[in-house]
Image: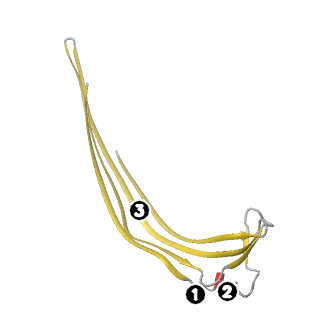
C-alpha cells in the first residue's frame, strides 16, 4: 500500500483581541493582529505485509511480517504575526447579519491603529524546514 498527501497552505488571518466590553458588541480596549502562514506539507506512507500459514500434523503455524515507512516534509515554512501599534482600539461589531459580523472602529483618533498596516509591528516569525522519517517493523508468529 502507498499513500501520498500534499497540503499547500497560504493563510492571511485577522484576529481581534477584545477587552473591557460595554455591551455584547462594543469593546473599549481592543487590538488587531494579522498573521500569515505559507507552507507546503508532503506526507507519504508505504506499507508491505507478508505472511503465511502452514500445518504439520496437529501443529498449525501462521506468521506475518509488517514493514511501514512514514515520511513528512515541510520545506521553507514561514509564519509571521504582526500587532497593531500604539494605544488600544475601540471596536464595535455590526451584527445585523449574524453570519457575517463586521468590525468597525468608531473612535477616529485610534481607528488608524486598526487599518494603517504600514505601522504594524512584527511580533513573531518562524522560518523552518522539517523532514522526519519513521520506520516500523512488526513480526508476528502464532
Please give the count of numbered marks on the rendered protein: 3
Q: Residue furthest left?
A: 56
Q: In the shown orientation, is residue 135 left or right of residue 12?
A: left
Residue at 67% x, 70% y: name it: 18
Tell me the tag on residue 119: 1
Separation (CA) of disc 2 from disc 3: 37 Å
- Label 2, secondary structure: give it: helix
Q: Earlier in the sequence, mark 2 or mark 3?
A: 3
Say which residue label 3 marks.
41
Residue at 41% x, 62% y: name it: 41
Q: Is residue 77 above or below residue 84?
A: above
- Label 1, secondary structure: give it: helix
Crowd tier of the residue under label 2, counting other residues whose Cα lies within 10 Å: few below 14, some 14–19, many 20 or above: some
Residue at 68% x, 79% y: name it: 89
Where residue 104 appears, as percent x and y from the top left, is 74, 77
Q: Earlier in the sequence, mark 1 or mark 2?
A: 2
Amino acid at each position: 500500500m502507498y499513500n501520498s498527501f500534499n497540503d499547500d497552505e497560504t493563510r492571511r488571518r485577522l484576529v481581534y483581541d477584545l477587552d473591557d466590553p460595554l455591551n455584547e458588541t462594543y469593546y473599549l480596549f481592543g487590538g488587531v493582529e494579522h498573521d500569515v502562514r505559507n507552507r507546503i506539507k508532503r506526507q507519504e506512507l508505504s506499507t508491505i505485509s507478508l505472511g503465511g500459514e502452514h500445518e504439520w500434523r496437529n501443529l498449525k503455524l501462521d506468521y506475518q511480517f509488517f514493514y511501514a515507512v512514514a515520511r513528512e516534509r515541510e520545506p521553507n515554512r514561514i509564519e509571521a504575526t504582526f500587532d497593531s501599534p500604539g494605544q488600544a482600539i475601540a471596536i464595535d461589531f455590526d451584527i445585523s447579519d449574524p453570519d457575517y459580523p463586521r468590525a468597525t472602529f468608531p473612535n477616529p483618533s485610534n481607528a488608524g491603529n486598526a487599518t494603517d498596516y504600514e505601522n504594524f509591528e512584527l511580533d513573531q516569525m518562524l522560518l523552518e524546514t522539517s523532514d522526519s522519517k519513521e520506520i516500523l517493523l512488526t513480526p508476528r508468529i502464532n
